[in-house]
Amino acid sequence: MLHKFISPVQAGMLIIVSLLSLNLFAQTSSQIIQKVENNLNGKSAYMKFTMIVKTSRYERKMQMQSWGEGNEKSFIKVTYPKKDSGITFLKRDNQMWQYVPKIEKTIKIPSSMMLQSWMGSDFTNDDLAKESSILDDYDHKLIEQNATTYSIELIPKVDAAVVWGKIIMIVSKEYMLPNSAHYYDEDNLLIRTLNYQKFQQLSNRMYPTYWEMLPQTKDKKDHKTIVIVDEAEFDKEIDSSYFTKRALKRYSK
Amino acid sequence: MIAYLDIALKSIKANLSRSIVTVFLTAISAAILIFTSTLMDGQHGIMLRNAVEVYPGYIQITHKAFRDTPSFDNLIFDEKSVLEKLKERNDIHTFTARFETAALFSSKTKTIGAMITGIEPENESHISKLKIALVEGTYLESNDTNALYIGVELAKRLKVSLGEQLSFISNAADYSFCADNVIIKGIFQTGLYEFDANSAFLNKRYFDEVFVSENLATHIIVLPKEPHNALALSQDIQKGLDETLISESWKEFMESLVKAMELDSIFSYINLGIFFIVIFFVIMIYTLLVVFSRVKEIGILRAIGTTSKQIFSMLVFESAILSLLGVLIGGAIGGYLAYYFNIHPIELKGEYAEYFKQYSIMSTALPTDFNLITIARDMSIMFILGIVSTLYPIFKINAFTPSEAMRHV
């Protein structure tokens, strides 16, 4: 019936325009994710943060410092509590090492342990090591937008070695930073939600200073991990010695 | 009826050598059947006992949600009060607490994730086979610190040996970070490959300090005075427990193993079924030969007015007497063998013992299960089989007319 209303040329043009608009959407969603990544990580970042782990029985507070270059390299040092002070983590080339002063040993975290809890929190080793890249390992699709936010669906690429079956990221149009990220497993079951709140001016940018990881599974219903960014500096040169295995012991003190 | 019995007995006496052979065949078959099935039951019993006694225990008390979600939110939060309640009971032989969790073990060259468990060495030695599974070094003691008792396969994977240092990192019960260096004090081998490749043990007193698990446990294991009453005892223990806890017997928490054993029994009975069929045909063929050698005699009986029904009854009586005799002798022999090897189990040595260990059976003794019900069942089966196997030859011979029978060569 379509040919009765539009000519074949018009129909062809309509298809091309439709495809172009789809492509534009794809580019837009990728650009959004790229901007989000840049705003979150910067070229480099130094931070001091507090992590509070809440469970049905305990509440623990830890303080840490981190040095990072983009999404590829990072170094974390635990400064509080005293018992854990001096524990350091190095993430480089999608691999992760940990130095524990008590046993005076550097341990490479094996791939099989990547989904294990990091320091007893609701973050995993994989969250730190970021073996998978949100930018490279996922196809992005803008599924919804309103006056203040974009909703972007991230589906893992076929050959990507990723943990999640799907991620829905809600991005603030004002700051081009995430408001929240919802992580689903392969069965499309919501596993956890990471909320980014309390946007404040830190260094040269607006930054979420209150991160709240809320597990959504029944077995962790009373768990919560809060990260409070106390200080942050972005895009300043970081001594490359932080991203060597030797740094794990050297900067532990 | 008495007349048939009388004729049958006379016939048995008249064909004494054939009768002895039939009784002998039936007796040997019954004895073999009884011995095989009691040995099979004994083997299953040993396998189940080993599977239960190597580590899991007869009764486990855990948090209700622990089995599905083994997290630190689902622990026994007041271990001491449960242990106090168990102490008051007089139907329990012993009990012990365990705290098991995952850890990352690191040697000089390897880092591997495995289970680490805090145990009470003395109590544990009465409940599980951990102590007797020792192959190198020494078992844990209640005052040990920084001493690790490690599975032989895990030690191999980590490329460590006795006396060497190993580090572990893990999460403590309060979700804080914990780590320490330990020295390998002992190496064990249960024969359960997965268990030996993923398990290491510490003295619980030391473990509780490192893992902040004072008065906490993941499991409390109970050894009943009468292990065969584990199910009833676990149900009784449950009555006195906090509603967050569950007491389960091995039949519940090792349901898959119980089902596997049942499946194995089915296959074993199929094998025995084949044995029955062979026996059936041996007796039938022999009876056929015996009966056909008596065709003339049967023909004469028919000619003097004996009906085919009477012939049938006479031959069935004859078969029943011989089968009963054979089954009684076979039952006595088989029963004696089952009894003897129950008290003096067959000891596997050398290669066979090693082969047995590969299948997670730590004991190399293979007893029979001397069970009168099993013996009576097998005797009944052999008796029925003996009679049924003679029916075809009897029908066959009865099909002859008297003149055909008398002319039969």
Image (cartoon, rainbow, N blue to C red):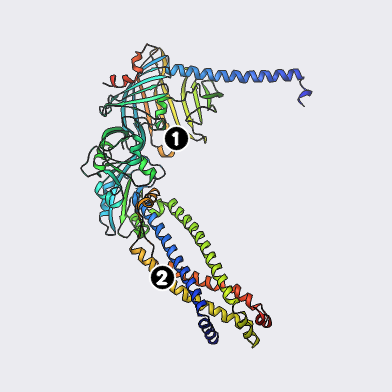
Residue A115's x, y, as percent?
42, 32
Find residue B144 and report its image quarter: top left
Residue A59's x, y, as percent?
32, 33
Q: Is residue B206 above or below residue B393?
A: above
Q: Amino acid at mark 2?
A: Ile
Q: Which residue does the numbered mark 1 point to in the structure image?
A: A216
Q: Which residue does the numbered mark 2 point to in the structure image?
A: B333
- Name the subunit of mark 1: A
Q: In the rendered structure, find residue A66 and report the number of the disc placed on it.
A: none
Q: Are marks 1 and 2 in contact (CB under 8 Å)?
A: no
Residue mark closest to the camera, 1 vs 2: 2
Residue B44's x, y, as percent?
41, 57
Q: Secondary structure at mark 2?
A: helix
In which quadrant will I find the N terminus of chain B? bottom right
Q: Secondary structure at mark 1?
A: loop
Residue B119's x, y, as percent?
28, 44
Q: Is A22 left or right of A90, judged from the image as shown?
A: right
Frontmost residue, B28 versus B152: B28
Q: CA distance from mark 1 to mark 2?
A: 66 Å
At label 2, counting other C-alpha atoms closer than 10 Å, the crowd grade (few under 14, some 14-19, many 20 or more) is some
